[in-house]
Structures are given as structure tokens and as C-alpha cells.
Amino acid sequence: MEPTGSHSAAGGPHRPAVGAVGAVGVVGVVGVVGLGTMGGAMARHLLAAGHDVVGYDVAAGPVAAFERAGGVPAASPAAVAAAADVVVLSLPSEAAFDRVVGGTEGLTDGGPARARVVVETSTLSLETKERGRAQLLAVSIELLDCPISGTGAQMASGDAVFYLSGSEEAARAAEPLLAACGRAVFFLGPFGNGTRLKLVANHLVTVHNASAAEALVLARDGGIDPQVALPALVAGAGTSRMLEVRGPMMVAEEYEPPTMRVSTFMKDIGIIRDFADRAGCVLPVFEAAAALHAKARDAGWQDADPASVHAVVERRPPA
């Protein structure tokens, strides 16, 4: 199964969406568990694409927004699995994942489920995902490992990328749904390869976020208005997606509302560090950038966007 994509305007991979998918069947109803920044945006994209979507979240606000968009709320993850053909998970932590999979009224606690495929899009340790995969296989549900590369703003605009891995048959069922939500879908083979590549991608996000902040401070202190410098830098050879996406927040010195909180991103940094340690890989540039993000958290920017590393480079405390 070759890499695929929903759009190819940037020269990325592309293949038409797949409808009928062997024994898995045609996807009629999609479930989304976790309706926050990422999950809520995916639900809206799926609704816009014409899918019936049933969803669940522990918080009332995201559920209300989902219902206003045309989604059907469910009482529990088990209820989502009972109503949907494919379920997408977008969860904030390993503890939340464990509750959704194996907790009371979780995916494995609701009796026979309609869903045969669950797509896990969160950034979690591979050990956690493997544990959940075993639990779901015990009730004949296939778990796909499919983290997202992109910020909340990118997901909202359909610019995120999916790193899909696991059973090829199950992946064919999930692929057109993911293609409706993002810019590209890459099938990477065996379960776990999605997480492995997402950690490499987040290594680059960490470094590029810090380098964008440092470059914009250097431009300003060197006598160039950052508002003039930013579009010129984005057009040049030194650009990065973080400069493009978070550069405007840095120039404006406005780091809220966050596309992701610094405190949440520090969780990802810890997972990357563990992955590198197990691989025996030394990452000096990453560690320098990670230290700037830790300083942002410790300086009081923990609930702000990671663009706030710009304030750390400027040595500016939160208001």
C-alpha cells in the first residue's frame, strides 16, 4: 500500500479515496472520541464531507460545539463503538487512552461493538498503544497507529498530515476518512511506524520552533522590523513550517489562544527523549531546543502556545 494524500497542490503523494474495503465494508458512520482541538476539527471535516458522525468527550463545551456542527453526541466511548463503523481517537494523555479503551464503558466494555477499526491519532508512547492494541484485538477490533503531524490551526484548515500504520486492510478503511481531514495520508507499514515517524517529526518541530523564535529576535535586534522580515524569511531558503505557522504569533507577541499548550508539548518532548535513548541516539540540537521549551513552561507560559519560546529568547515574562 503506497503513501497516499488527500491533496497534491504542494506536490505531495495522492491517490483517490477508497470506498469499499473488503471485509471491513463501506464506512457509513464515523465515531470520534475526544472532541477537543484536533478531534473536534476532524469531526467537522468529516461532517463537511457528508459522513454521519457520532462523538464523545468528557467536557460539555466540545460536545455542544460538535452537536451544533451536526454531530450526534454519545454517552460513552462504548456507545460510539456500538454506533460507528470506524472510530477515531484524539486523546490528551495515556491515562485518557487507557480509560477510553479499557475503562468502564470504554471500547472493550460495552458488549459487541459495530466498529471493527479504531484509529489512534494521539501522540502517546508506543508501549501504551501496543497495550491498547492487544486489548482491542481481544474483542476483534483492529487498532491503527496514526498520529498527526500538524498544529491545531493546521488541522482546522485541513493542512495536517497523518502517519498511518498497522493492518493494511484496516488502513484502507481509515484512509479516505483521514484524507477528508488533512493534506496527506502516509501509510508506513507495520503498527508503530506511525508513532516512530511522528516522534522524528516532533523532533523537527521542537528545533524549528526554537530556531524561528531566535531568528526573529535576531532580525529585530539586528535592526530589521520583524513584520518586514517574516514574509521575506518564509519565502527564502531558511523557512520552516513552524516559521510559517508560529512566526506570526511571535511577531505579534501573542501566544494565545494556543494551537497546543506548552505543558502538552513537554509531554511530547519527553516521549521523543525516551525514544532517542532507546535508539542510542544523541540529539544535542534537540536538547538545546527542548531546554528553551522547558524554560517557557517554568517561566509561566505553560498554558500558552509553544510560540512562547520567543518570549524566553526575548527574556520577557508572561503578562
Image: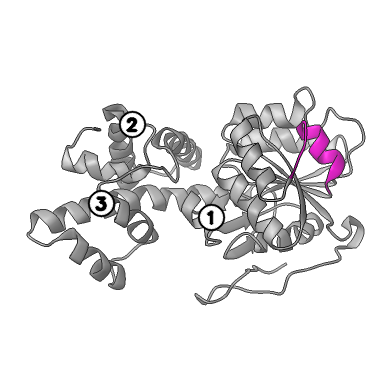
Label 3 with label 2: CB-CB less than 8 Å? no
Q: Answer with left or right where residue 214 lies relative to residue 18.
A: left
| Between 121 and 279, the one nearer to me in the picture | 121
Q: Is residue 292 above or below residue 3?
A: above
- Residue 126: where, in percent of width, then height? 61, 39
Q: Nearer the viewer, mark 3 or mark 2?
A: 3
Sooner in the amino-acid sequence: mark 1 or mark 3: 1
Q: Residue at x 65, y 38 (%)?
A: 64
Sooner in the amino-acid sequence: mark 3 or mark 2: 3
- Residue 205: where, in percent of width, then height? 40, 51
Q: Answer with left or right where residue 270 lies relative to residue 192.
A: left
* Mark carried by residue 156: 1
Judged from the image, the secondary structure of the residue bearing numbered disc 1 is helix
Q: Can residue 80 be found in the magenta stretch?
A: yes
| Between 26 and 40, the one nearer to me in the picture | 40
**Which residue bears the numbered disc 2?**
297
Quarter in which the N terminus is drawn? bottom right
Residue farthest along the left direction in this orientation: 223
Q: Residues within 10 Å of mark 1 (few under 14, many from 20)?
A: many
Quarter in which the C terminus is drawn? top left
Between the C-alphas of marks 1 and 3, the distance is 21 Å
Between the C-alphas of marks 2 and 1, the distance is 25 Å
